């Protein structure tokens, strides 16, 4: 069991990190102009994914080596939670003051920011990722979404 959990944590950690590189690669392939309307939400999304990758790596290290403790993880991620929230809210003025950007840049910027918001919710508030979408839909309907692992750790660190 410990081995399968370790594999899952490694998969989560490396998967989130690979996503960061994949998003930036796609950006440089698809977008010829570099606009803040796309770069900003992409950066916010990648920061949240990178934080997730580091968190899963910390969980993996806790599992594989009992001598390693990360006592301040919850406190550190508590601070990151509010920094991320400010970064997400920082996109609103960018959209408001943007001078006539093309629909393509507007669409992808908003899409990336929505993706960042979903990742923020998934890591810092409630668990949104399940092996079966039916589980998530059922939990939304019954209003029984569970706190994410990171949200629980942040809560414990605040006690």
Image (spheres, grey):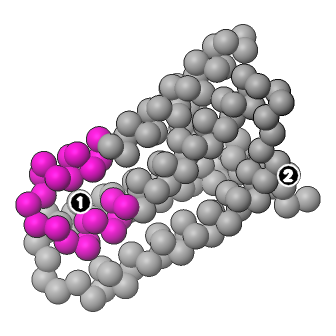
From the viewer's perspective, is residue 4 above or below residue 22? Answer: above
Q: Which secondary structure, mark 2?
A: helix
Task: Please tell me the numbered disc located at residue 156.
Answer: 2
In the rendered image, residue 1, in percent from the top left (x then y), is placed at 72, 11
Can residue 148 be seen here? yes
Q: Position of residue 157 (x, y in %)?
A: 84, 55
User: Which residue is denoted by mark 1 in the rendering?
Assistant: 108
Badge 1: how crowded within 10 Å, few (<14), some, or many (20+)?
A: some
Circle 1 — which element? helix
The answer to whether residue 74 is left or right of residue 132 is right
Between 22 and 136, the one lying in front of the other is 22
Residue 116 in sight here:
no
| Nearer-the-camera pick, 33 or 155 | 33
- State yes or no: residue 34 in magenta: yes
Give how far across and how far down residue 158 sits, in percent: 85, 61
Contact flag, marks 1 and 2 (Cβ < 8 Å): no
Seen at 72% across and 14% down, the residue is: 2
Of tags 1 and 2, the one toward the viewer is 2
Q: Taking 125 as reference, is 44 left or right?
A: left
Q: What type of secondary structure mainly makes up the magenta span?
A: helix
**Magenta stretch bounds:** 22-43
Q: Which residue appears farthest toward the front when viewing the image?
A: 67
Question: Is residue 5 one of those drawn in magenta?
Answer: no
């Amino acid at each position: 069991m410990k081995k399968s959990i370790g594999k899952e944590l490694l998969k989560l950690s490396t998967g989130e990190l690979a996503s960061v590189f994949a998003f930036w690669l796609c950006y440089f392939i698809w977008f010829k102009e570099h606009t803040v309307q796309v770069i900003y939400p992409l950066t916010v999304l990648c920061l949240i994914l990178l934080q997730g990758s580091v968190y899963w790596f910390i969980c993996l290290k806790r599992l594989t080596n009992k001598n390693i403790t990360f006592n301040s993880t919850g406190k550190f991620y508590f601070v990151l939670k509010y920094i991320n929230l400010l970064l997400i809210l920082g996109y609103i003025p960018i959209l408001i003051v943007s001078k006539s950007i093309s629909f393509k840049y507007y669409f992808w910027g908003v899409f990336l920011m929505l993706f960042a918001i979903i990742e923020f919710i998934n890591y810092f508030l409630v668990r949104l990722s399940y092996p079966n979408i039916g589980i998530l839909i059922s939990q939304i309907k019954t209003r029984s979404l569970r706190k994410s692992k990171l949200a629980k750790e942040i809560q414990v660190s605040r006690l």
